[in-house]
Image: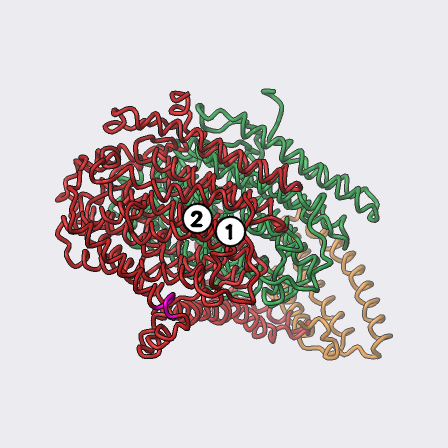
Chain colours: A red, B green, C orange
Amino acid sequence: MVEFALHHAWLVPLLPALAFVAIIFFTRPWPMLSALTAVAGIVGSFIVSALAAYGVFTNPAFKEEPLVYAVRWFSMPGLQIDVGVQLDPVSAMMIFMVSMVASLIFIYAIGYMKDDPGFSVFFSYVSLFAASMLLLAISSNLLEMFVAWELVGLCSYLLIGFYSHKIAAREAAKKAFITCRIADFGLLLGLLAMQIVFGTLNLVELSEKIANFEQYTTFGILTLIAVLVFIGPIGKSGQFPLHVWLPDAMEGPTPVSALIHAATMVVAGVYLVARTMFLFHEVPGAMELVAITGGFTALFAATIAITQREIKRILAYSTVSQIGYMMLALGVGSMTASLFHMWTHAFFKALMFLGAGSVLHALHHKADVWEMGGLIRKMPLTGWTFVIGGLAIAGIPPFAGFWSKDEILAVTLESGHYVLFVMAAFTAFLTAFYMWRLIFLTFFGEENPENHPHESPAVMTLPLVGLAILSTIGGLVGTPWAPYWSEWIFFGHPHHVEPNYWVMIGSVVLAAAGIYLAYQLYYVDKAKSRARALAQRYNHIYTILYNKYYIDEIYLWFNHTIVDGAAKLFYLFDIYVVDGIIVNGLGKLTCLLGEGIRVSNTGRLQNYALVFFLGVLAVVVLLAFTGPSAASLIVGGVK
Amino acid sequence: MESFPVLLTILLAPVVAAVIMAFIPREEHMLIKCVAAAGTFVSMALSLYVYFAYDQSLGGLQFVQQVPWIKDLGVTFFLGVDGISLPMLLLTNLIGFSAVFASWNVNHRPRDFFILLCLLITGVMGTFVAQDLFIFLLFYEVVVIPIYILVIIWGSTKRVTKEYAGMKLTIYLLIGSAFLLVGVIALFMKTVAATGAPDMSFAGLARAARGLSDFDQIWLFALMLFGFGSLLSMWPFHSWSPDGYAGAPTAVSMIHAGVLKKIGGYGLIRIALYVLPVGAKFWAPVIAVLGVCGVAYAAMAALAQKDLKYIVGYSSVSHMGYVLLAVASLNVIGLNGAVANMFAHGIMAALFFSTIGFIYEKTHTRWIPDLGGLARQTPRLAVAFMLAAMASLGLPGLVSFVPEFTIFVASFKVYGGLAVVAIAGIIITALYALRAGANTLFGPPRPEYDSLKDIRGPELVPLAVLGTVLVVGGLLPFLIFDMVNSGIVPLMAEISGALKLGGSF
Amino acid sequence: MLTTISLAHYMVLSALLFGIGLFGVLAKKNAIAVLICIELMLNAVNINLVAISKYLTPALFTGQLFAIFVITVAAAEVGVGLAIIIAIYRNRLSVNLDDFDWLKW
């Protein structure tokens, strides 16, 4: 079984893809059948990935040598692209994680999307997404990965705009696609440069060639490539300054937010950088860039999250911030810590999104946290699982988030990035604060009499419980005392971070302080008067934060004024200069010439006869006074 | 099967259909349409057969038919296909067949319409299977006349009148072909003077042209570049394209944007580059610059459009810029990309125009601010639109991604920064394609379109045929590339000497 | 010396006749006069033909034969021409060529 899974790992993306095809062409009229098809596809894929992951993690040979098999996709002299599967600990972990989270979310969606007219279509889209995401994880070739990368972007677009009759959803979808497209432009350039410089996009071959690459022969080209490649993750993973699409993406159905915009797709950027670590590792400058981008984004997004009011928006900024952590870890050179955080984050963030979905489901899509309150009494399962998620993200031991976040802090400190360490630590405090602000406002305190919440059905709460369990124990695979994780997931050589008790204690203290502050402001103070007073007092800062530093407005202005203005100019130029002056001008000129020559057509036969006579006369005179050569010139080329 | 004249049959099937239609009473609309569909179907089926029966390992011209015609000019009725012309032939037939169904609802003088359409398809096919320059030009001129009539009778008047559009289209192309003709005649005279034996076949001309001086090659190539370039809507000779497509009826827009334009690119590679490699090498930087200008300029102009057909019209100009850039790279990868991209763009543009045609037919408008929310009322139409839009922005998994990627590889290698500008075009393309999609299909549904009927029955054929090719070609790009490559490699092998040593440039 | 009439004499006569005819064709306003002048020109050619044949190739009668052809054709031409002029006169009540510029543009 395990051998079969290892050698047929292409089934992992294929099964959801087949489900997609089946739903589109066959089962669309029957919603439940479609849902079952989708779930069957993803669960099948989960089983295969679990077996494959088992096979990988029980065989230490995989640490050294990945299992690769590929077929030719297209080729021509000088360019050959293969598509295939590369199984190593990293990709095995990724497909396992993705298919597991996706399975849970698919099941949840059966309950959440019930009675939606687009039920079947929804499941076809998420199946396609799962297929693309798993393909991305398992790719053996960077172009293949890019294909999957764009396809997940497409699915994200389709699913954000799932409620396409809503203008907000439509615009958010478009924004997501375009923003990612801008980033993909950089990534594509990076891939092209790699193809041209190294002649291959195969991960294994690239890693060998780059390791042996003489940097001095083409000075700086590696740096350029690394920076270009990193632009892609900046967009896809919502890093500053291309983070703007991610919060808007919450217009999509909540399972989508959980699956795509929290657990899997948005961490594809992290995964890509991890996959191309052999490139970044060679370029310290690019590593710094990754670290700074990550660290800054983590803090930046956390500050915005403090002031937001919509439940999913807070979670979205939290996602941006957490991915910033992962990038930071990558940048300081620890793929281990980064992917560990990705692993735990997938659980607790999916959990919280699904919890938020459950809340929205109960409150009929009322999203403002200030209008909620006391929900935990009516929705205990949702509430308590959410609290577990909150503890995990805040970094309270022994929940999953503690271990991974602690490791990130430790490696940052160890690598000597003190400023980034302080930023990250402060972010940890902010994270605990805004997340518990959300929890206190939503689940505790007084109930809002306008709300009539009810607990969600089992099909929705069971995945919550599953994810809550994973969020609790998921981090135990990588504690400093039992570092299984770092034995398998690493770049170069396994690196065990010594348990740094100061960092551990410090991070717990910061988290606890954040939670305590939230407790004081939003729980103890029933009227929230102190919170309001604070907002009043620091009104400027509050307004800037609440409006997300006006970055959206700047982009909007740029897009509508500069880009559209330029487009208008080009169009006017086309109409009035190219078309008006040159093309129609030539036409007019021809007409004018005709008008001019027309005058000579008097219509009088005698005029014509006179001209004819003069012509004959001229020819005769010419013939008479010059030799035969001139004659042949006039009469024609007859020799 | 060896002696069975497949190519001639492919060529004549629509003509036979046209002749039959001429004898059908004009009121028999359904019968007429069925005959047109049958004629184009025969061509499509046979060209699919030829596509898969072509022996790629052998390469070269296959399915050859040769009948001496005008001895004094060295003209033979010479048909044959190779790896470059075969994708174009297939493209023509796929689009031709779809175009018949896209015009299924033409009820104004349908007999005349479909007769002209069939003749048009034959003309376009002829240019791709002809291996003799004279025959090529003959078919090319055959193409122009039906187009003019189709546009001025069945066209639509929006920003410009259909008469203006038809006139502009025709005159522009005739001017282009006039320059081309001058070039061809000069080339012919020069080669005859050099070798003494007249030969109009591509291969013969290429052999004879080896003896031409660099200077001759350069100015002859310039004439051909203008001729083929204006057909390919090379910037700044592109302005016939948006107006022409906007004025033309759906089927003509499909065929024109889908394949007719590609005659320019095909001629540029198969004739101009093949016969005059030194000239090509001299003009390559110019072609590249014009190509990049076209990409960026047309993409920006498309962004400012509000008429769906204008968007696609400008977008096709923009995509042809990529083809030019690829040709200018003058290497195997680039030329592979150029031919494959022509194929991909043909499929995509045809699907786009057929979809817009249906939208226009049903809502009587193409003006984006008057549209919106159609995805709810006409979901299949929305699927077709989104497929075309996604292919247009080069989404991986659809047919146009891999060709664009290869073009980028080739041109990035040769032209560096210039290519970056072209590659940045993918952002603008995404912007206008998605805007068009979003504002047409999504958003609140408009009550006035509640009673619209989604496409069904024969109307689904363009989506089924072109959509299938779009996806299959995207997932299995080797189907196209192996074929194209089998044509490009020998061509490049023949001219590589000239490209490397080519004079003092 | 005065007794012999050489080819040159015929040719001069023919040239004069042709010139007069040409002037008439170009300058006359009356359509019938123009027609008559055309006849003059044709006859000038006939004189030339006969004279040259007589002097240069006396054995052959090519020129004479040709002249007869010309006379025949001229007769037919006058017939058609007069018919046209009459038709125009019926419609327009004029044979003045200045009135007839309908072929303009």
Q: Which residue is mark 1?
A: A159
- Callout 2: chain: A
Say which quarter of the image contains residue A208: top left
Residue that label 2 marks: A260
Left or right: where does residue C18 sit relative to residue B433? Answer: right
The answer to if A627 sits in the magenta stretch is: no
Position of A549 compared to A376: left or right? Answer: left
One can see residue A573 in this view = yes
Report the magenta stretch's main SS.
Answer: helix
At horizontal 68% and vertical 45% (from top left) the residue drawn is B100
Question: Is A522 a magenta residue?
Answer: yes
Q: Nearer the viewer, residue A518 or A17?
A: A518
* Residues at circles 1 and 2 in contact by the CB criterion of under 8 Å: yes
Subunit that carries the residue with mark 1: A
Image: A78 above or below C15: above
Label 2 secondary element: helix
- The part of the image, by quadrant, that contains residue B286 is bottom left
Label 1 amino acid? Leu
What span is in magenta?
Answer: A521-525
Residue B217 showing in the rendered view:
no
